[in-house]
Image (cartoon, rainbow, N blue to C red):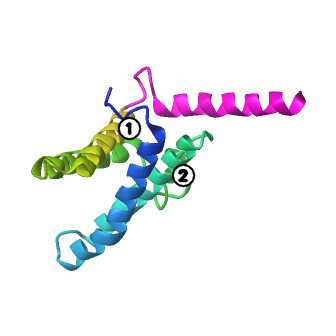
Amino acid sequence: MPPLASDWPALAVAARRILEQRRTLDPQQVAKGRLTEADAAARLRVATALVAQWDSIAAGQPPYDAETAWIVSGGTEGTYPHELRTDLNAAADRARALADRHGEDAEAAHFAEAVAALAWHARPPDHISNILDVAHANAAFRLRQSSNRAAA
């Protein structure tokens, strides 16, 4: 398990950083011809879904269902699990390469660890700690606790 896998707020922050990087840098890559507009739009859609998912998880709410959003919207919102895994694995590789290139930059190393943890959580749901299952259980527990307090 990656070191930051259980630090849900840190993973939500990393997801927002990925989204902001794509909002800022992808248009420049399109202008330089290094990225197509369609690829930039897909990367932005995936990162937006990632933020929605991790913000809901960090808040203890039922997690955003990126796959259902993708299906219902016809692919204009959300993301399919394989697409998310592929995207996060590539992002983790890039973040690690940048951190290694700038070895004394603790922030780059922390970000690389966080992106690796995001990719780890995006694994297929056949492992014991599927983040969506854990997040659903966490949200249900919080709801039950607040209901018990209200009834008391």
Q: Residue at x 45, y 58 (%)?
A: 48
Give neighbour class at mark 1: few <14, some 14-19, many 20+ (Cα, 10 Å).
many
- Residue of label 1: 122
Q: Image point 37% across, 57% down: which residue? A: 17
Task: Please report the residue visible at 56 percent of the width from the left and 53 percent of the height from the top.
Answer: 72
User: Quadrant location of residue 130?
Assistant: top left
Q: Position of residue 137 (x, y in %)?
A: 61, 28
Q: Position of residue 41 (x, y in %)?
A: 36, 67
**Quarter holding residue 34:** bottom left
Q: Position of residue 53 (x, y in %)?
A: 50, 47
Relative to 147, is 97 on the left or the right?
left
In the orientation shown, which residue stands out farthest toward the bottom? 31
Q: Judge by depth and name the residue closer to the eye, 103 or 35.
A: 103
Query: Who is closer to the viewer here, 145 or 66?
Result: 145
**Residue 69 image label:** 2
**What residue appears at the point 30 percent right and 48 percent down from the top-left corner?**
111
Foreground: disc 1 or disc 2: 1
Numbered badge on residue 84: none
User: On the rendered structure, is 128 left or right of 114?
Assistant: right
Total numbered labels:
2
Amino acid at the residue labelled 1: Ala
Q: Is residue 45 above or below residue 26?
A: above
Q: Nearer the viewer, residue 23 or 2?
A: 2
Q: Secondary structure at mark 2?
A: helix
Range covered by the magenta-colored residues: 124-152
Location of the N terminus (image quadrant) = top left
Secondary structure, mark 1, is loop
